[in-house]
């Protein structure tokens, strides 16, 4: 709101005019136009004894909400794009024109995705991490189980078990395209379990007791991975991703137990390669620092094992398999730094 008070050369003569403006204020004094600067509150015109005083109020203009995608629900209204594909949904042109400055370059904030098949579905991806950035990160996972925290059926008695598993995974990656990176990661994992005692009693003819059983394993793995992000907004705060990695690792394990009054110690040497798929979520907690959580849900693997019991070679085997399940022991948390 702009209030203009004009005092003429005639005493006791005052004229008040009220107008509304958004960008600049233009006032007229004795037929001459004067533009009020943004940082001024008083302008004196060239005509003597005439003063124009402007009091400016703050004006808040609400941001226009963009309709990001328009969906053609009626098949008869669906147009065709320049490639001849039927348009099922199209992105608002105003959204496509939004840009952001990255390293001195102006890049669009919306990344259109390719449309395969006969239809243009209006798919797009918000810019999350631009091309040319490096990311350094560390991912860790930890799991622990203790029989002290659970209660089991009365058929199982004297159950005493403790186990832990954890892993550390440093990684480095380079964004060869916006929201897409390729990199290397290394993984060290270690786990152990101790069964102090377990007694199962179904009836007089079916009961058994286990005790003094332990298992230990550790593995070293190196892998090449590709990660694709999908930004969830223009503020570059949240994104989901899918990661595919090809890994090769080696490790060893030891299994100790008592059999017929004799202690047996079986050592297994393992080499393994795998193809894994891990979706996840990323959130930037600072400008250059992000928090990641990923879930291992699908994988293919081939494993070669060689066993020794009490120092004697017992044989070897090759196994392969696939899994498609949510694994509670394969939830990874980590931090990443982009530069």
Image (cartoon, rainbow, N blue to C red):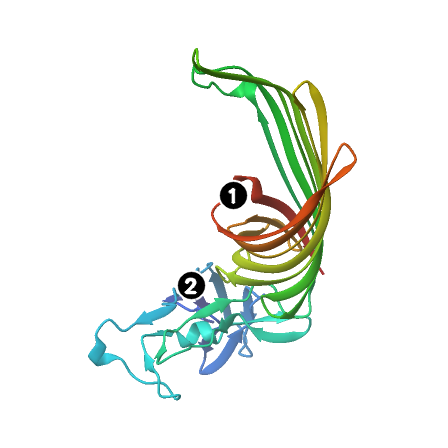
Give the side of residue 90 with respect to residue 187, left or right. left
**Frontmost residue, 39 versus 156:** 156
Give the side of residue 271 with respect to residue 89, left or right. right
Between label 1 and label 2, give the one nearer the viewer: 1
**Frontmost residue, 89 versus 172:** 172
Q: Quadrant of the C terminus?
A: bottom right
Q: Quadrant of the N terminus?
A: bottom left
The image position of residue 25, as x and y in percent, is 47, 72
**Frontmost residue, 162 versus 313:** 313
Q: Is residue 197 depicted above or below 25 in this figure?
A: above
Residue 220 seen in render: no
- Identify the residue position indicated by label 2 in the image: 63
- Say whether marks 1 and 2 touch (CB < 8 Å): no
- Identify the residue position indicated by label 1 in the image: 327
The image position of residue 124, as x and y in percent, is 45, 70
Q: Element under label 2? A: loop
The image position of residue 196, as x and y in percent, is 63, 18
Q: Is residue 320 depicted above or below 43 in this figure?
A: above
In terms of sequence position, does the residue under pointer 1 or pointer 2 come before the other?
2
């Amino acid at each position: 709101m702009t209030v203009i008070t004009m005092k003429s050369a005639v005493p006791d003569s005052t004229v008040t005019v009220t107008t509304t403006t958004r960008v600049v204020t233009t006032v007229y004094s004795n037929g001459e136009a004067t533009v009020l600067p943004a940082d001024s509150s008083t302008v004196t015109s060239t005509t003597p004894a005439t003063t124009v005083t402007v009091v400016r109020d703050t004006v808040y203009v609400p941001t226009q909400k963009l309709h990001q995608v328009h969906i053609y629900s009626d098949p008869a209204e669906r147009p065709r794009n320049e490639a001849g594909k039927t348009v099922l949904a199209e992105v608002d042109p105003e959204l496509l024109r939004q840009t952001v400055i990255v390293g001195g370059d102006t890049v669009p904030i919306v990344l259109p995705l390719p449309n395969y098949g006969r239809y243009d579905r209006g798919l797009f991806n918000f810019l999350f991490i631009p091309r040319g950035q490096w990311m350094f990160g560390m991912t860790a996972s930890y799991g622990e189980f203790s029989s002290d925290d659970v209660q089991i059926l009365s058929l199982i008695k004297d159950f005493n078990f403790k186990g832990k598993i954890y892993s550390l995974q440093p990684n480095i990656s380079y964004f060869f395209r916006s929201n897409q990176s390729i990199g290397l990661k290394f993984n060290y994992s270690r786990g152990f379990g101790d069964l102090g005692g377990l007694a199962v009693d179904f009836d007089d003819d079916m009961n058994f007791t286990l005790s003094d059983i332990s298992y230990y394993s550790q593995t070293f793995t190196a892998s090449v991975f590709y990660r694709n992000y999908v930004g969830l907004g223009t503020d570059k705060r949240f994104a989901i991703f899918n990661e595919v990695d090809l890994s090769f690792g080696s490790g060893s394990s030891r299994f100790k137990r008592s059999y017929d009054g004799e202690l047996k110690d079986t050592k297994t040497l393992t080499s393994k390669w795998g193809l894994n798929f891990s979706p996840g979520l990323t959130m930037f907690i600072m400008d250059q620092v992000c928090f990641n959580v990923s879930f291992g849900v699908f994988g293919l693997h081939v494993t070669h094992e060689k066993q020794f019991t009490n120092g004697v070679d017992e044989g070897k085997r090759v196994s392969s398999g696939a899994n498609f399940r949510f694994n509670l022991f394969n939830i990874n948390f980590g931090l990443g730094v982009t530069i």
